[in-house]
Amino acid sequence: MTGNDAPMVILLAEDDPGDQQLVKRVLDEGGVRCDLRIVHDGEEALDYLLHRGRYGDSTRYPMPDLLLLDLNMPRLDGREVLRQMAAYPSLRRIATVVLTTSSQEQDILYSYDLGANSYIAKPASLERFEDVIRVLEKYWFHIVLLPPRENDR
Amino acid sequence: MKSFFPPKKSILDRVFLQVILPPSISIGLFIFIIFQLLFPAMEEMVYERERDMIQNLTASVWSLLDNYHDRALSGELDLEEAQRRALSRIREIRYGPDMKDYFWINDLYPRMVMHPYRTDLDGQDLSDYTDPKGNRLFVTFVEIAKTQGEGFAEYLWDKQDETGRIVPKLSFVKVFRPWGWILGTGVYMEDVEKDIARTKRRLYGAVLGVFALLSALAGWMIRQGLTMRKQERLAQEKIERNNRELEESNERLHQTQSELRIRAAELAERNAQIERVNAELVQKNAELNDFTFIASHDLQEPLRKMIAFSDLLRRDLKAGQSERIEEDLGFIMGAAARMRVLVQDLLALSRTGRDGVKREPTSLRDCAERALAVLSERVEAAAARIEFDALPVVRGDRTLLEQLYQNLIGNALKFRGTEPLQIRLTAEFANGRPVYGVRDNGIGIKPEYARQIFVPFKRLHGQTEYEGTGIGLAICAKIVQHHGGTIWVESEPGRGSHFKFTLAEEEPGK
């Protein structure tokens, strides 16, 4: 559990501006107190997580408590991100929720095999999207105990 | 037809040799034996018989003389009486066919002692007696008697009782030494010849009969032979006819067989074709499945967004948040526009090669030039340097190949790097096949994506970075496929890509 002062950090890896906007608004309007960071593809996501390139400053770009990962992204897709994350023990601890349009069985199996904590197909309606975000927030921020933040130690 | 004449002649020869000649030879041989061997032998036999007869008869009469001599010696008769009685007995002896043949006796002087018909000669000196040929016949008798005791002699003599008719005669003489007499008797050749002629006449009859019989037999044999030959010939002709018919039906069979073979080959060909088409269909089906999945997914994306942002729009309208309303509408319109592009591209993909693919001589250089003309603005904007290998004339669809170059060059223009863009339209040989292509010095593609870029809608870049639906390369793949070729990319990220494609191998004569 984190301190009350610092909001939960959510990293959204999503290339579609529409989906980015949707997540942003649902979180806003749902009254979820969080720090949403957005990256646009897999490479950027890994850069962020590994503090590479422009994400070198770990105070400006804090490690996320929750990663919302799209699978189909340009340059480096979500599957590859999962595969590379598995190589880093610190990244393995990050709660990872795959949020994708794909409902293909091989994607689901692949994601869980590579350490994803949940697999969610993007809902078609706004209401369902709000439900999903609400449940995610409640579950990950209020029910489960997440590993302590590195910079807290 | 001309081949018919020589065999016919040879058939005639064969008929003569096998049918007519053997019986003819038999008859000829028969006649030869009869006239050349049998008749002379028979004549000889008759003469022999006559000779034996007169010899035996002479021996019998001689023993009569001997008997009288014995009686004179025993004193029963005196010599004169014995001789007189003997002579009278012998004078009366007759034999022969007319009982006119006789014995005569002369002495060794020679003088005639007794002659039954020529009594005028009795007691006459015969030393100078000759037959009409000058033959001193009695002297000859005496010589035979003195040297051999007995023997045959031939000469001319009066015919028995018919005095004056002188004919050839064969006689046997035998000496009776105690009295110095020569006993003789003979047969007339005339009579012997008559006998022979009589026998011959009988034989002639028999020979004629046998000859007739033989001729009839030969005729029958010849007829039989000819009939057989004819039947044989007919049978032969029938066999030949049957053979010809057999050959003809054999030929027909061969024809049917080769037709069957051809048909089997055609069937195999058609089967292979069906299998090929089937395999193509299976592949097309799989592609279609993938495509449907991806297409529906990609089409659903903007739809999902339109629905979600419409909900947000309604909410924002109620709340009267004009700023947000604008934003929502922007997303909705963006999604709609994207959807329109997707649908248009989908249509373009489905139209590619739908109207059939032409196979006309097409200059790849012309296709590339026209594609560059279409893209001229972008080429100028990118300040791209275009180079050409020697692009040949191929068989293909001008419009589709132009589209192919347009998409590939467009791709090179789109994914250019920081260096001045260089595009080369290549033509080379690899594994004996011509390989064409478009090479650039752009951003390149990672090897792991080298395959999926040809799948429809598989975009490697975010919409914000590079525009497009990811269907251009799918269309390229389809065009190349329609030409019976393949397309692939060789690339090194950051150093450029070389898109390469083949077209169907040139089939000479097609």
Image (cartoon, rainbow, N blue to C red):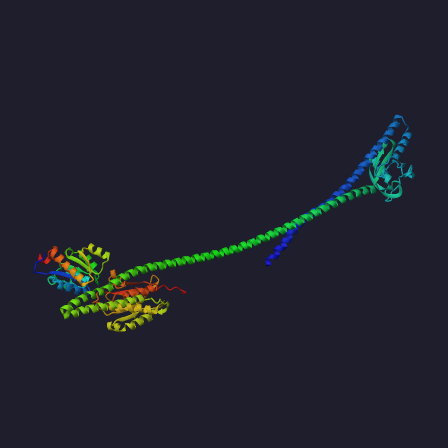
Residue A46 lies left or right of residue B130; in this view the side is left
Q: Position of residue B490 (x, y in %)?
A: 27, 63
Residue B3 lies left or right of residue A3; in this view the side is right
Identify which residue is drawn at 68% across, 48% down.
Answer: B220
- Which one is in front, A135 or B179? A135
Residue B158 lies left or right of residue A64; in this view the side is right
Q: Can residue B450 be seen here?
A: no
Q: Position of residue A102 (x, y in %)?
A: 22, 60
- Which one is in front, B395 or B500? B395
Q: Is residue A1 above or below residue B202?
A: below
Q: Position of residue B366 (x, y in %)?
A: 33, 71
Q: Quick one: quadrant of the N terminus of chain B? A: bottom right
Q: Can residue B288 be seen here?
A: yes
Q: Quick one: quadrant of the C terminus of chain B? A: bottom left
Q: Quadrant of residue A8?
A: bottom left
Q: Position of residue A112 (x, y in %)?
A: 20, 55
- Which one is in front, B218 or B468? B468
Identify which residue is drawn at 44% across, 58% down.
Answer: B263
Q: Quadrant of residue B500?
A: bottom left
